[in-house]
Image: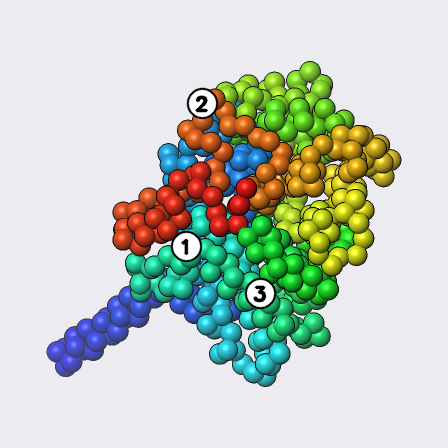
Amino acid sequence: MKKYLFLLLCVAFATACTDNFDELNTDKKNPSNVTPGSLFAGSERNLVDLMTNGNVNINIFRFLPQYWTETTYTDEVNYDLSTRNIPQNFWNDMFLDVLKGLDECADKIPSQNDAFFPAPVKKNQNACVEILAVYAFATLVNTFGNIPYSQALDFNNVYPVYDDAKTVYGNLLDRLETALGDISTGDAGFGSNDLLFGGDMARWKMLGNSMLARMAMIIADDDAAKSKGLVEKAYAGGIVASAADNIAFQYLSSPPNTNPIWVDLVQSGRKDFVAANTLVDFMKNLSDPRIPGFFTQDAAGDYSGGIYGASNNYATFSKPSEALTAPDYPSTLVDYSEMEFLLAEAVERGMSIPGTAEEHYNNAVRASILAWGGSDADADAYLANPAVAYSTASGDYKQKIGTQKWLALYNRGFEAWTEWRRLDAPTLVAPAAADSDIPKRYTYPVQEQNLNTANYNAASTAIGGDKVTTKLFWDKF
């Protein structure tokens, strides 16, 4: 009898141990199965955070247009991209945290219950995924040039080939057009899992058309006919057409859903950044009414910027404004000012867009001033300045539009860097101690050089050398 009791106890103990081990081997914080909606929300948030933050290990785009400069550590404003492995960090975050999540989301959409997610809803969801994927891939192309694309998201292939940047960009434009054609504004999308629009598909259509206009204009010097056709199509489809249409991701006042700039500049307690003299001096020379919206007053009660590329005393100079560094400050993806500058350029390039270049230019400048706390009277006075007025400002249309667009895109470093490369205005000068001229692209990640060597070498040769001064296919002048 004792023998049988002993055996029963052993069996019970073994069963309990098995149950305990099963529980211990289950990662409750990282579920093995997630819904498409949660994957979409995560990728959406990761994309906006990546483009918004000011972390010098990832995003130095506000330095490249010389909006901000550094105080003690000046590697990044002198274009040292390698010490902190900035290109690699940006590359990995975009591929892993954004694009891979979107890819997995797309894989899961068809398996959702048709009773709750009918075909039109699934189609809308796929369109949302495609629009964000196009945004992410286009950002990578416009940062690096040739990139892994056709094999990029097959993680079983650790040696993906690099695809030609122009070919990738053309495919992205096709994908965006298809996604726009698939949207049904009368049907739902991701609902509450859509952190940007709450499932409003009309807003997704406006974002997609605005992206199409932006992407098409970027290639205007490379393929004028294609650019013209797509800009006109996007305009007819409905781009951001007023300040009420502005598209921005709204952060919250409490962690963890706060503005990354607040996290990097306020919560961290660090004192690494001040306004750059390049921008502040330019604005003061024009009596620009946006300065109080951009920056705090300096120690003397005025506005001043630290010398771009040099060491600067944090207490002495103006800093990013309190509004911009608030925890709930939104991150703008597209705004009315940007689209009006684009339309001014479209008119100058002979595209079929109503209105004159001057009218769109004035609308763009006014919208920016109002958005940063200025008044219509401020805008009137500013536009009356001969150095600002479209008819008298110096330079050709690219210089006029490019200079004012550079000012209006403040705090949107990536778009500002892209437009500066494309329009070649204003004139920016690299610091005397800089490692290179102002970068026209990021160099490829070190991991690609070491682990994907053959494909890296082929890509480097194809673009004319893996250097920051190598121009992208659309950067013709």
Q: Give the quadrant of the N terminus.
A: bottom left
Residue 449 lies left or right of residue 122; in this view the side is left
Residue at the spot of label 2? 433
Given contact means CB atoms under 8 Å apart, are the residues at marks 2 and 1 in contact? Answer: no
Q: Position of residue 21 (x, y in %)?
A: 28, 66
The residue under label 1 is 147
Tell me the residue that label 3 is attached to. 176
**Which tag, 3 or 1, sits closer to the chain's start?**
1
Question: Which numbered disc flags the more N-terminal residue, 3 or 2?
Answer: 3
Q: Position of residue 255 (x, y in %)?
A: 57, 46
| Residue 104, numbered circle | none
Out of 253 and 56, give the one closest to the viewer: 56
Whether 344 is drawn above or below 267: the answer is: below
> Element type at marker 3?
helix
What is the CA distance from the residue labelled 3 to the residue labelled 1? 19 Å
Residue placed at 58% from the left, 65% from the top?
176
Q: Residues within 10 Å of mark 2 (few under 14, many from 20)?
A: few
- Residue occupying image coordinates x 38% and y 45%: 464
